Amino acid sequence: MRKRLIAPTPQTDPPSDQVWLDLSRIASVEVTSEQNGYPIESALLGEENRGWRAANPGTQIIRVIFDEPQTLKRIWLVFEDIENTRTQEFVLRWSPRTGHAFREIECQPWNFSPGGSVREIEDYTVELSDVTALELIIVPDKTGAEARASLLRFRLA
């Protein structure tokens, strides 16, 4: 018997059977920085395949502010770095209609390694009601190195 090991092909596009929120119609976004040619719309709307990149090193915040309170059932994130070895951490949190305090959904570290682990895909099933804001805080390198945050995809349902 002949046998070969093949690398799995991670999915970079969100599952096609899901109806995703059209954030361009129902929300605004705040971001601490963005590199020219890699706007946040690329990650949120999926119109291009480049995603978002920070213009500056260090911790970055992406905040989606809904025009009207939303119910969220799914959050899908894809991070990718094919060039750098680093340990990233992100915090995902939300704010309910009743106040401005944020509640944590997830805090997740990830080790990027070129030639190894270059893509992190997170798919969360949630039951969040009356969401007025969703915030993604990215610490691109927990060692304090001058790494820049990036995000390939960010979808909400």
Image (tube, grey):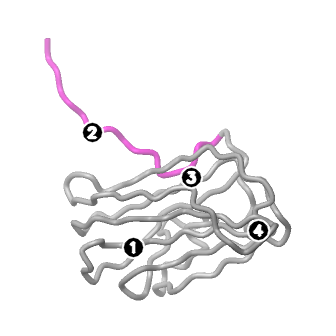
Q: Residue at position x 28%, y 64% from top?
A: 87
Q: Name the residue tied to disc 2.
A: 7
Quadrant position of residue 59: bottom left
Q: Residue at position x 21%, y 60% from top?
A: 114
Q: Name the residue tied to disc 3.
A: 76
- For the N terminus, which image quadrant? top left
Secondary structure beneath disc 2?
A: loop
Answer with mark 2 or mark 1, whichever residue precedes in sequence: 2
Foreground: disc 2 or disc 1: 1
Graded by Cα atoms within 10 Å as few (under 14), some (14 to 19) or many (20 or more), the crowding at tag 2 reads few
Q: Identify the amino acid type marked 3.
A: Trp
Foreground: disc 4 or disc 3: 4
Alpha carbon distance from label 2 to label 3: 22 Å
Q: Residue at position x 48%, y 50% from top?
A: 122
Q: Which mark is residue 132?
A: 4
Secondary structure beneath disc 4?
A: strand
Answer left or right for 24 relative to 112: right
Answer with mark 4 or mark 3, whichever residue precedes in sequence: 3
Q: Are marks 3 and 1 in contact (CB under 8 Å)?
A: no
Alpha carbon distance from label 2 to label 4: 40 Å
Answer with mark 3 or mark 1, whichever residue precedes in sequence: 3
Alpha carbon distance from label 1 to label 4: 23 Å
Across and down, in percent, residue 38 comes to: 49, 78
Secondary structure beneath disc 3?
A: strand
Across and down, in percent, residue 31 comes to: 57, 82
Q: Residue at position x 19%, y 55% from top?
A: 115
In the orientation shown, which residue stands out farthest toward the top?
1
